[in-house]
């Protein structure tokens, strides 16, 4: 069965293969077509997901997943198997998760592209996720990010500082890594010759002038182990992909206190939530007030174009810096509400909600998108 549909504003062919169909004769060409279409649609990820009836191929575009094709089980398994071969994974081990990288030349790309592949067994079959190169769709410089002026000013103060910890917060897919990469690029541009080392899980894209090390939460090269060693490599600026536990948090804060600039991410909904997380990880208030430069929280909203269509995304972000009022609240171990009230009076401070509302007024997004990201009460 075949039917036409509108996908991301374009007419595409959705294919549902009959149950008695055989896998494509040329699996390589078939998979290349799927990846090439994803590239043309500006997708960040491709999901090959087993279902009760077969396999769904879905593209993530501007943060949301859309079905690009539906196939019978045999075709779905062929797609997954071909991807595993391309990434040099063990095709006979279908009982364990595996990760790898594949390199592919596509008609829509000027040069071969490197993509990440992750597979995992499910009750319906093997599920695969392909991550396309981030640089194809993500902004590369601070100016291109279109961040609020107050946030840009704060980030530029950090760029010109010589010590302190900057924490980026937000849920997965909120653009934290993109902002950090742009920030590091600005530091390299303005201060060449610095020793900059990043610990990432995984490395999203190459940064000239930066030493990037891939770590794993469960392998031999963990954040904690790598950070202990990196501090003996004479770095001036450190980036941690994520602070996940008390041991890493303690090492990170000590690095910031000893004169390093440190950039990290934390899973928290707001600056107040990020500071509360540091409390929960066992850091003392005096350590936080002495080491923390500031906290940035952000979300991504789909950008409206052509009178209602969505294309690309724009950030709603807020930034707070350590000042006297916030320092007092931290030293008194204030809860999230107390911390939030302490920084709301900072110069030019605007909450993410306020920034999002302004983006609606400026016609860069719409109220429907704000409600989708921030909730129905937004």
Image: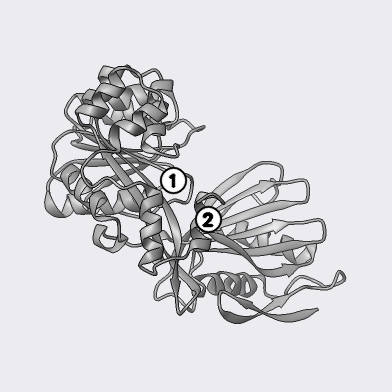
Category of crowding for the residue at label 2, using alpha-carbon neighbours closer than 10 angstroms: few (below 14), some (14–19), many (at least 20): few
Residue at 55%, 58% in the rendered image: 130
The mark lying in front, picked from 2 and 1, is: 2
**Quadrant assignment, res 182:** bottom left
> Element type at marker 1?
loop
Q: Earlier in the sequence, mark 2 or mark 1?
A: 1
The answer to whether residue 242 of the structure is visible from this angle is: yes
- Where is residue 107? Give x, y as percent: 49, 79
Residue at 30%, 61% in the rendered image: 146
Pick whichever, 349 or 34, lies toward us. Answer: 349
- Location of mark 1 (residue): 202
- Please determine whether, in this image, residue 288 is positioned above or below residue 196: above
- Where is residue 211? Give x, y as percent: 27, 45
Residue 372 left/right relative to 255: right
Pick whichever, 292 or 181, lies toward us. Answer: 292
- Location of mark 2 (residue): 371
């Amino acid at each position: 069965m075949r039917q036409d549909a509108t996908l991301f504003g374009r007419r595409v062919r959705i294919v549902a293969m009959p149950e008695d169909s055989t896998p494509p004769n040329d699996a390589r060409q078939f998979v290349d077509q799927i990846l090439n279409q994803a590239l043309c649609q500006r997708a960040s990820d491709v999901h090959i997901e087993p279902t009760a009836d077969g396999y769904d191929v879905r593209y993530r575009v501007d943060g949301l997943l859309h079905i690009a094709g539906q196939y019978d089980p045999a075709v779905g398994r062929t797609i997954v198997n071909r991807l595993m071969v391309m990434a040099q994974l063990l095709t006979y081990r279908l009982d364990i998760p595996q990760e790898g990288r594949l390199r592919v030349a596509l008609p829509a790309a000027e040069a071969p592209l490197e993509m990440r592949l992750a597979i995992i067994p499910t009750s319906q079959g093997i599920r695969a996720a392909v991550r396309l190169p981030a640089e194809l769709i993500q902004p590369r410089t601070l100016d291109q990010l279109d961040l609020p002026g107050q946030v840009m000013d704060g980030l530029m103060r950090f760029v010109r500082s010589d010590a302190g910890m900057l924490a980026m917060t937000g849920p997965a897919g909120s653009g934290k890594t993109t902002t950090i990469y742009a920030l590091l690029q600005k530091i390299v541009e303005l201060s060449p010759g610095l020793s900059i080392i990043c610990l990432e899980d995984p490395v999203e894209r190459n940064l000239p002038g930066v030493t990037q090390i891939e770590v794993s939460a469960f392998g031999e090269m963990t954040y904690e182990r790598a950070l202990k060693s990196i501090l003996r490599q004479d770095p001036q600026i450190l980036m941690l992909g994520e602070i996940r536990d008390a041991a890493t948090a303690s090492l990170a804060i000590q690095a910031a206190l000893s004169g390093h600039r440190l950039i990290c991410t934390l899973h928290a909904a707001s600056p107040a939530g990020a500071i509360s997380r540091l409390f929960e990880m066992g850091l003392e208030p005096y350590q936080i007030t002495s080491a923390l430069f500031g906290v940035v929280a952000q979300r991504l909203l789909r950008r409206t174009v052509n009178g209602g269509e969505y294309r690309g995304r724009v950030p709603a972000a807020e930034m707070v810096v350590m000042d006297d009022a916030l320092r007092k609240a931290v030293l008194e171990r204030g809860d999230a509400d107390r911390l939030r009230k302490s920084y709301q009076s900072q110069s030019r401070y605007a909450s993410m909600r306020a920034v999002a509302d302004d983006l609606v007024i400026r016609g860069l997004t719409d109220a429907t998108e704000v409600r989708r990201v921030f909730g129905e009460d937004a």
